[in-house]
């Protein structure tokens, strides 16, 4: 039976980060992935030669001193990840469809404050107070600084008050409240359910800058592949743990894989959905309360995605990277509710992509979506879905196509839809229980599954642990990594990597 120091389960951005971090600290690591290849939600796919992203489209925090910048630097892959900043307000626009009002989100908190004050001259105090609070939360959150992270949660006063309560206390202006809530779509939880602290932790980086990445998630995967090979990390795809054996004193002695192989390790870290972790752990070692807590976690919103190409002869320079969010209502509690019956929010992203020596004008669109919408086909599997599902997709694609062309009439004849994905697509591709975009809702007052589990050598990390999105998934791995590597060695390592 082969022995590893650490087995990392799941090779999305969370698992890749952890495997590389541990291996850089001289630990012998095995990375297990259920799919045929690594990358998880970072994977791209190709249609008509053009690349499209699945679960990674843009990020914040990509500036010197920002946590993403630091994590990539520590992992030695910063230079392979080239940001394409959305550097003007126009590039990140929010449109209220009912009256056609458009608001441009300038990058940089000080620019954004000034700009919003021009839109809402009577709301200067509310705007200042809001951004002061977001900044204060970010400064108080030690886990956004790799030198200070630890397993003890950063609990501050703002963890116990919802975004909704803060906004209602600041202003009665519905449009301003909506604009300050728009990034709820970047973590998939309603303003009344998310703490102001977690909202701020996700938004601070996005307010400072929004960037797409050249070559999207593929740039990350290739960079990680380089490190995996340099460090000699063992990777097994099409592999997953089916059983935990020889449990003594709550310590798992043997992990059994689907292919019959068995391994022993000091630590096994799951970076997959919490409800999938519990399926693997032996029930007699878990309390009822533990199982109930994990079962009670709710999924975040998912997305229905439509992928398109603009096939025209116009110069590429006219086709800038932009994100436009069309908002049919100003209440995000409504827009992010599975019970909402009205028109959905729609995010339209334009991006120039290069592949095989050609440049493509791509359009990716997202509509929030929920399990309820696809309930009728929940037992079907990818590639084998019934005709009724194809018809549902066709209708939804057509509706979205019309909305794209309403906003961009110039694409009426040149927009070519090449594919679409529902939350069932994401569920099946990512081996998740529900296809939600960000794992579990990280609701106010909730105690997530993170760090050491009831079995002493088993841990949880990944996007459902501390913060959603790629930054949150990577951060969870740094925090668990520190606990495994040990405080002193970790501190020396980080200091060394960030100083050189
Ligand atoms: C449509 C969509 C759009 C998004 N857009 C953005 C965005 O623009 N910016 C952003 O920051 N975030 C975005 N996200 C969220 C982001 O993709 C995730 O937060 C992040 O990628 C999660 O990383 P992870 O490693 O925790 O999980 P995943 O990427 O889901 O990786 C988990 C891996 O574990 C594997 N696995 C599952 N079960 C097992 C098992 N039992 N054994 C072994 N392997 C297993 C899966 O196959 C998968 O490869 C988006 C998500 C979606 C779905």
Image: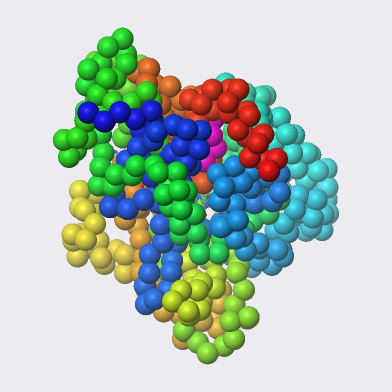
In the rendered image, which quarter contains the N terminus?
Answer: top left
Report the residue that reaches farthest toward the bottom.
Answer: 313
- Give the position of the C terminus as an image quadrant: top right
Left or right of residue 162, residue 27 in this image: left
- Residue 479 appears in which quarter of the rendering? top right
Q: Residue at x 41, y 49 (%)?
A: 229
The correct choice, above or below, for 319 with respect to 85 in the image is below
**Residue at (29, 63) in percent of width and height:** 392
490 in the magenta segment: no
**Residue 494 % position (x, y):** 62, 34
- Exactly how many numbered labels are in the figure? 0
Q: Residue 394's spot in the image, x, y percent?
A: 31, 69
Q: In terms of depth relative to the viewer, which is nearer, 135 or 373?
A: 135
Q: Picture coordinates of residue 34 (x, y %)?
A: 28, 45
Q: Residue at x 32, y 16 (%)?
A: 251
Q: From this view, report whether residue 227 is shown above or below residue 25.
A: below
Q: Is residue 242 above or below residue 62?
A: above
Q: Nearer the viewer, residue 307 or 97?
A: 307
- Magenta span: 474-479
Instruction: Decide if residue 242 is on the left or right side of residue 222.
Output: left
Q: Residue at position x 45%, y 43% from top?
A: 231
């Amino acid at each position: 039976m082969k022995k590893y120091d650490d087995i990392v389960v799941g090779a999305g951005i969370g698992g890749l980060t952890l495997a590389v971090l541990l291996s850089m600290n001289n630990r012998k690591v095995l990375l297990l992935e259920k799919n045929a290849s690594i990358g998880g939600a970072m994977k791209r796919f190709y249609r008509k030669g053009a690349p499209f992203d699945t679960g990674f489209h843009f990020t914040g925090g990509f500036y010197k001193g920002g946590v993403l910048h630091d994590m990539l630097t520590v992992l030695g892959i910063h230079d392979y990840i080239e940001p394409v900043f959305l550097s003007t307000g126009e590039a990140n626009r929010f449109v209220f469809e009912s009256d056609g009002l458009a608001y441009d989100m300038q990058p940089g908190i000080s620019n954004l404050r000034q700009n919003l004050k021009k839109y809402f001259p009577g709301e200067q105090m509310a705007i200042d107070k809001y951004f002061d609070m977001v900044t204060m939360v970010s400064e108080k959150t030690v886990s956004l600084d790799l030198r200070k992270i630890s397993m003890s949660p950063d609990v501050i006063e703002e963890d116990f008050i919802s975004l909704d309560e803060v906004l209602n206390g600041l202003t009665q202006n519905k449009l301003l409240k909506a604009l300050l809530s728009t990034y709820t779509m970047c973590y998939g939880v309603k303003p009344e359910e998310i703490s102001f602290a977690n909202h701020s932790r996700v938004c601070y980086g996005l307010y400072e800058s929004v960037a797409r990445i050249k070559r999207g998630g593929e740039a990350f995967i290739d960079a990680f592949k380089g490190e995996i090979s340099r460090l000699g990390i063992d990777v097994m795809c099409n592999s997953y743990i089916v059983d935990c054996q020889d449990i003594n004193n709550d310590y798992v002695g043997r992990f059994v894989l689907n292919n019959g192989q068995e391994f022993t390790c000091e630590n096994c870290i799951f970076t997959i959905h919490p409800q999938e972790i519990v399926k693997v752990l032996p029930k007699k070692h878990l309390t009822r309360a533990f199982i109930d807590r994990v079962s009670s976690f709710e999924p975040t919103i998912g997305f229905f995605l439509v992928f398109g190409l603009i096939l025209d002869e116009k110069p590429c320079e006219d086709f800038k990277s932009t994100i436009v969010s069309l908002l049919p209502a100003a209440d995000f509690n409504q827009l992010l509710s599975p019970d909402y019956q009205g028109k959905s929010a729609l995010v339209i992203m334009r991006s120039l992509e290069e592949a095989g020596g050609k440049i493509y004008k791509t359009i990716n669109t997202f509509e929030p979506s929920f399990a309820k919408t696809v309930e009728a086909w929940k037992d079907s599997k990818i590639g084998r879905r019934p005709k009724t599902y194809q018809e549902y997709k066709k209708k939804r694609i057509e509706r979205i196509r019309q909305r794209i062309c309403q906003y961009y009439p110039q694409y009426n004849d040149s927009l070519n839809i090449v594919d679409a994905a529902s939350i069932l697509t994401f569920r099946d591709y990512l081996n998740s229980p529900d296809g939600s975009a960000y794992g579990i809702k990280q609701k106010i007052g909730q105690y997530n599954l993170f760090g050491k589990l009831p079995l002493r050598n088993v841990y949880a990390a990944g996007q459902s642990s501390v913060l959603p999105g790629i930054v949150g998934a990577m951060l969870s791995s740094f925090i668990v990594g520190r606990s495994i590597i040990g405080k002193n060695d970790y501190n020396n390592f980080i200091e060394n990597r960030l100083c050189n």
